[in-house]
Amino acid sequence: MDYSKATLIVISGPNGAGKSTHIQKMLPTQFRGIWAFDRDKTRTEFENRLRQEGLVLSEIPVKATRLTFEAIELYDGMKGPVLLARVENNKVVNASGYALKKAWIKNGLPSIFNDIKSFIQSP
């Protein structure tokens, strides 16, 4: 992985599955001590800030999902790290059809889900 740019790594799984432990093992040595954050809490706080700024209600989930990352990688951590999709500068550059089966992407990241679907369906 290229960590020279701001990158968001998402690893999904149920409580106690070892997601945080896996993060510590996956990241290079210079990133030791990085902590996992509560995505739901972070997104909720960001959505509240967008509401206060007067953003149109329908645009809040899109803006909150995209945040300000140059690259977003979505992983499934259920059976080890499996890259589901990579988004660079708001464009899907790599995606697995398995990403479309993940409810947390479909329901929690609907705009990215739709971009992944379009990417996979394109020739």
Image (tube, grey):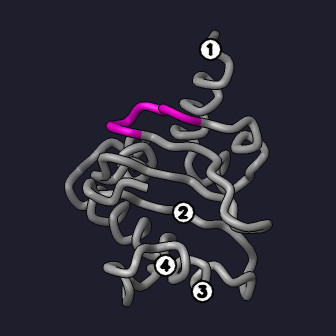
Whether label 2 touches label 3, CB < 8 Å: no
**Start-end of magenta stretch:** 88-94
Spatial CA distance of label 3 from label 1 is: 36 Å
**Residue picked out by circle 2:** 10
> Which label sits on residue 21?
3
N-term mark: 3 or 4: 3
Spatial CA distance of label 1 from label 2 is: 25 Å
- Residue shown at 48%/62% (left/top)? 9
Task: Give the residue type that dot 3 points to.
Answer: Thr
Give above or below for 57 relative to 5: above
**Residue picked out by circle 1:** 122
N-term mark: 4 or 1: 4
| SS type, badge 4 | loop
N-term mark: 3 or 1: 3
N-term mark: 2 or 4: 2
- Residue shown at 23%/50% (left/top)? 54
Mark 3 surroundings within 10 Å by alpha-carbon count, few (fewer than 14), some (14 through 19), many (20 or more): few
Give above or below for 117 relative to 108: above
The quarter in which the N terminus is drawn is: bottom left
N-term mark: 1 or 2: 2
Mark in front: 3 vs 1: 3
Residue 74 lies, in percent from the top left, at: 56, 53
Mark in front: 4 vs 1: 1
